[in-house]
Amino acid sequence: MDPEDRPASSGDGSPVDDPGDGGSTTDDPIDEDSVGDGSADDETIETDPIDDGPIDDDSSDDVPTAKAGVADDEGPGLPYRFRHDVEGPLMWLREMLSSVAVVLLIGLILFAVSGVWPPMVAVESASMEPNMKTGDLVFVTEPGRLAPDVADNDLGVVTHETGEESDYRTFGEYGSVVIYQPPGRQASPIIHRAMFHVEEGENWYARADDRFHNADDCAELRNCPAPHAGFVTLGDNNRQYDQANGLAEPVAAEWVTGVARVRVPYLGYVRLIATGQAEVSDVLGTVVVSPSTGYGTEEIRASDGTAGSVAA
């Protein structure tokens, strides 16, 4: 073939393939490489899950947001409102329960100290005036607890007689004030001062103060000789010993239920009013003084030798 009859060559001087060589063109090698390894398509497929991941995460984040919106619509829960409400029934309930809890806690602490329950008693009458008054709340301890060094018995009771010798005073006078309950007594326990101790069969007439009995000898004095060992007792505002007026025999050790330690004025009226033993007007009456005698009406009434009882 003459040179003039040959096909023209490409611009880069590369020979043009003859169609007779199998129909391949210059683009065939590129297509074969693309189809052969599939790397471009594979890379696209592998990145699809990576691209989808953040989309899924974004959609999942929407769920808690929706739930939070529901909770906001419902408002705070009951426990939260009970603790934080500043008005309404939950606030009143919280305050009431808190007050009851504080009272119970104080009661438990006092019980741990006193050893008796209840650890406080309310004075019902005026037989211990002026050192204890009606409506006083008195803290007591079990016999033998917190006993002073001058006590000469297991009860921790210091008698008026011993108190004079050792200068031991409680509630304005010498000696200890005891709470006792004689056998068979249906009324409230008695709170009076222990004056002296007698032994069984003792003639205690000579030891008795003439101001607190009207007898001329032991034969005329009730409970003399002493039917059994015990304390001779007296209300500070009474004219006669409890044993001389027949209120009680000498107070045996097992009759003593507590020893008075501290009094809180007027607080006992809460107990007395709640149990129907006093009226609100009685609280006001305690400050009324008779212009002729200078004594409160309760004080005059108690001077006849009645028992100073307490509400437990």
Image (tube, rainbow, N blue to C red):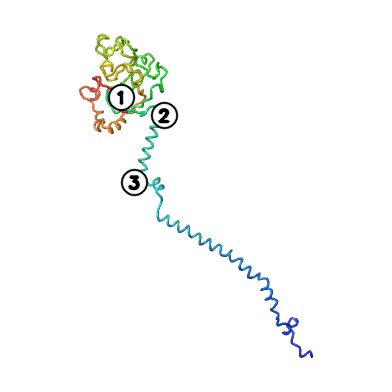
- Residue at 31% across, 13% down: 227
For residue 163, side relative to residue 223 (left or right): right
For residue 112, the mark is 2
Q: Disc 3 designates what residue?
A: 89
Neighbours of disc 1 within 10 Å: few (<14), some (14-19), many (20+): many
Of residues 102 and 169, the one drawn nearer to the viewer in this rendering: 102
- Residue at 22% across, 22% down: 293
Quarter of image, res 46:
bottom right
The image shows residue 70 at horizontal and vertical percentages of 42, 57
Q: Disc 1 designates what residue?
A: 189
Of residues 76 and 229, the one drawn nearer to the viewer in this rendering: 229
- Name the kind of residue labelled 2 in the image: Ala
Neighbours of disc 2 within 10 Å: few (<14), some (14-19), many (20+): few
Indicate whether 52 appears above or below 303.
below
Quarter of image, res 146:
top left
Neighbours of disc 3 within 10 Å: few (<14), some (14-19), many (20+): few
Q: Which of marks 3 and 2 is nearer the N terminus?
A: 3
Of residues 20 and 235, the one drawn nearer to the viewer in this rendering: 20
Indicate whether 158 appears above or below 104.
above
Disc 3 from disc 2: Cα separation: 34 Å
The image shows residue 310 at horizontal and vertical percentages of 30, 26
- Name the kind of residue labelled 1 in the image: Pro
The image shows residue 258 at horizontal and vertical percentages of 36, 23
- Name the kind of residue labelled 3 in the image: Pro
The image shows residue 91 at horizontal and vertical percentages of 36, 45
Q: Quadrant of the N terminus?
A: bottom right
Asked if the residues shown at circle 1 and circle 3 are in contact, with their CB atoms under 8 angstroms apart, the answer is: no
Q: Which of marks 1 and 3 is nearer the N terminus?
A: 3
